[in-house]
Image (spheres, rainbow, N blue to C red):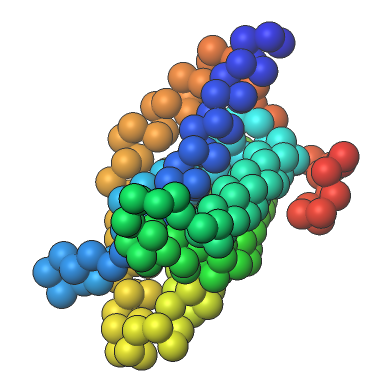
């Protein structure tokens, strides 16, 4: 039991860390060929990989706790950065403008990330949980990809629309949305040779392979 809790805790910490870093990095747009990505695209898909692993090994009910932990951590990070931006800078420190430019969008990005993150992660976990009940141990790769398509699709559309609408041209916004979605799904597919064996290894090490047989899927209900 102790080993099971340790692996669950470490996986949850990595999930939250990837979420926080990607929220900050999301303020920059990066062109790669015909695609345009937010900076967070390099790390954020990992949260869905960890979400898949958490749900597959420890169930939707346990994953729900980690999702809300990520929300709380994001809230405090954004609140603290907002307060720091508002405070006067010390004499001789001449980087206030650069600091404001870097972090001034954080509150808006936080709101976008909050809504998109909750919708995307809970959809991903819910779909994967239901597919596991249907297929049991079979078709793990297919289950991971299908849940990601739905979860990442919702996340990408909601986040980009709230965070970037009115800031960048609409044609660039659309390009950013479909670019991000395609990249995230491809990321999930490419990493399957790592995520599937790792998930099976975790099940073996922890002895955990839970099913949401009687789970209440209400994302706001944490005790059942």
Q: Tell me which residue sits at (61%, 16%) in the image.
A: 6
Q: Nearer the viewer, residue 136 or 168?
A: 168
Question: In the rendering, at what x and y percent does residue 52 appear?
Answer: 53, 42
Question: In the rendering, at what x and y percent does residue 112 appear?
Answer: 55, 69
Against 182, residue 187 (above or below) is above
Q: Quadrant of residue 117?
A: bottom right
| Residue positioned most to the front | 91
Q: Nearer the viewer, residue 96 or 47?
A: 96
Q: Nearer the viewer, residue 71 or 52?
A: 71
Q: Nearer the viewer, residue 133 or 57?
A: 57
Against 6, residue 139 (above or below) is below
Count numbered badges in the picture.
0
Against 161, residue 128 (above or below) is above
Horizontally, residue 164 falls left or right of residue 66, namely: left
Horizontally, residue 25 falls left or right of residue 4, namely: left
Q: Quadrant of residue 193?
A: top left
Residue 43 makes an appearance in the image:
yes
Q: Tell me which residue sits at (67%, 41%) in the image.
A: 69
Against 188, residue 99 (above or below) is below
Question: In the rendering, at what x and y percent does residue 187 appear?
Answer: 32, 51
Quadrant (top left, top right, bottom left, bottom right) of the N terminus: top right
Q: Tell me which residue sits at (57%, 19%) in the image.
A: 7
Q: Quadrant of residue 10?
A: top right
Residue 127 makes an appearance in the image:
no
């Amino acid at each position: 039991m102790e080993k099971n809790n340790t692996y669950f805790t470490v996986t949850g910490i990595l999930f939250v860390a990837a979420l926080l870093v990607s929220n900050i990095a999301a303020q920059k747009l990066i062109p790669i060929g015909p695609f345009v990505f937010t900076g967070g695209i390099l790390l954020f898909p990992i949260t869905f990989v960890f979400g898949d692993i958490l749900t597959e090994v420890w169930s939707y009910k346990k994953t729900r706790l980690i999702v809300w932990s990520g929300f709380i951590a994001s809230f405090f990070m954004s609140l603290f950065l907002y307060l720091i931006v508002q405070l006067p800078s010390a004499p001789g420190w001449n980087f206030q403008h650069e600091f404001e430019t870097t972090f001034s969008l954080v509150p808006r990005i936080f709101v976008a990330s909050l809504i998109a993150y909750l919708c995307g992660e809970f959809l991903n976990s819910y779909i994967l949980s239901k597919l596991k009940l249907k297929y049991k141990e079979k078709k793990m790769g297919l289950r991971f990809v299908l849940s990601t398509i739905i979860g990442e699709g919702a996340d990408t559309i909601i986040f980009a629309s709230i965070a970037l609408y009115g800031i960048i041209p609409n044609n660039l916004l659309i390009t950013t949305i479909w670019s991000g979605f395609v990249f995230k799904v491809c990321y999930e597919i490419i990493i399957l040779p790592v995520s599937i064996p790792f998930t099976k290894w975790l099940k073996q090490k922890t002895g955990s392979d839970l099913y949401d047989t009687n789970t209440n899927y209400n994302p706001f209900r944490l005790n059942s």
